[in-house]
Amino acid sequence: MHKVVERSHAGRGWADGTKLADLDFADDIALLEESVQNMQHFTSVLEEEASRVGLYISPDKRKVTVSNT
């Protein structure tokens, strides 16, 4: 995930200038992004990096939640 975040410059910005890009669980991740376009780029980079180490992201198990602040 570190490589993915570096390549995509992903994450939800905070007032102090830091970003939160993902929440990691045992075999799941929650990706956080500020726009649909940025999320598309983030997931594309994630798929590329995952395939390099032999991981596959199932399209059937993806879920998208939109939150408006």
Image: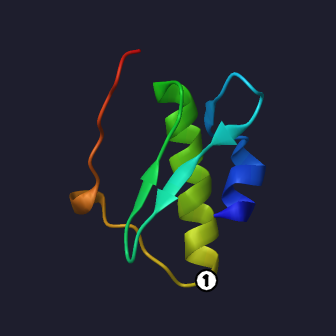
| Residue that badge 1 annotates | 53
Q: Secondary structure at mark 1?
A: loop
User: Left of 43 or right of it: where is 61?
Assistant: left
- Going by the picture, which residue comes out furthest to the top? 69
Q: Residue furthest bottom?
A: 54
The residue that appears at 70% across and 45% down in the rendered structure is 8
- Dot 1, crowdedness within 10 Å: few (<14), some or many (≥20)? few
The residue shown at (58%, 45%) is: 42
Q: Which image quadrant is residue 57 in?
A: bottom left
Q: Is residue 12 shown left or right of residue 25?
A: right
Q: Amino acid at mark 1?
A: Val
Instruction: Locate the N terminus by quadrant.
Output: bottom right
Which residue is pictured at 51% across the width and 50% down the height? 43
> x%, y% of residue 46?
57, 59
Residue 36 rendering spot, x and y as whole percentages: 46, 27
36 shown above or below 44 = above
